[in-house]
Amino acid sequence: MNFEEKLKRLETIVQQMENPKKELGELIKLFKEGAALTKECRTELSSMENEVKKVMEEINTGSKSEPEDESVDRYNDENDELPF
């Protein structure tokens, strides 16, 4: 599933969770799926942000930069909000 598909699925999950007729077990299942997708999206956003920074550095310096450690997840705190 690509980034856009994950966001679309998150929107669907939110809509489903807003249904007052959903059973608690189903809500927990949806919540877990949403939490996992959110973590994946944060990781992808961090990677994309690093890529943009590299490109901007290349533009500003006129040379290619050294690869950064993409394992660093700027959005790894579960209490952080997605930046949109």
Image (cartoon, rainbow, N blue to C red):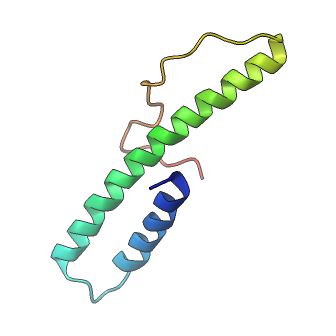
Residue drawn at x 59%, y 36% as measured from the top left? 48
Name the outermost residue toward the bottom: 21
Q: Check the picture and name the quadrant holding the N terminus.
A: bottom left
Residue drawn at x 72%, y 12% as measured from the top left? 64
Q: In this view, does 3 lie to the left or right of 53?
A: left
The part of the image, by quadrant, that contains residue 65 is top right
Q: In this view, does 24 lie above or below 66?
A: below
Residue drawn at x 54%, y 41% as measured from the top left? 45
The part of the image, by quadrant, that contains residue 10 is bottom left
Q: Residue 8: percent from the left, percent from the top?
A: 51, 66
Q: Is residue 14 above or below residue 71?
A: below
Q: Is residue 80 left or right of residue 32?
A: right
Q: Is residue 2 above or below residue 49?
A: below
The part of the image, by quadrant, that contains residue 31 is bottom left
Q: Is residue 19 above or below residue 79?
A: below
Closer to us: 63 or 43: 63
Name the outermost residue toward the left: 25
Residue drawn at x 44%, y 43% as measured from the top left? 80
Q: Is residue 26 left or right of residue 77?
A: left
Q: Residue 41: percent from the left, percent from the top?
A: 46, 47
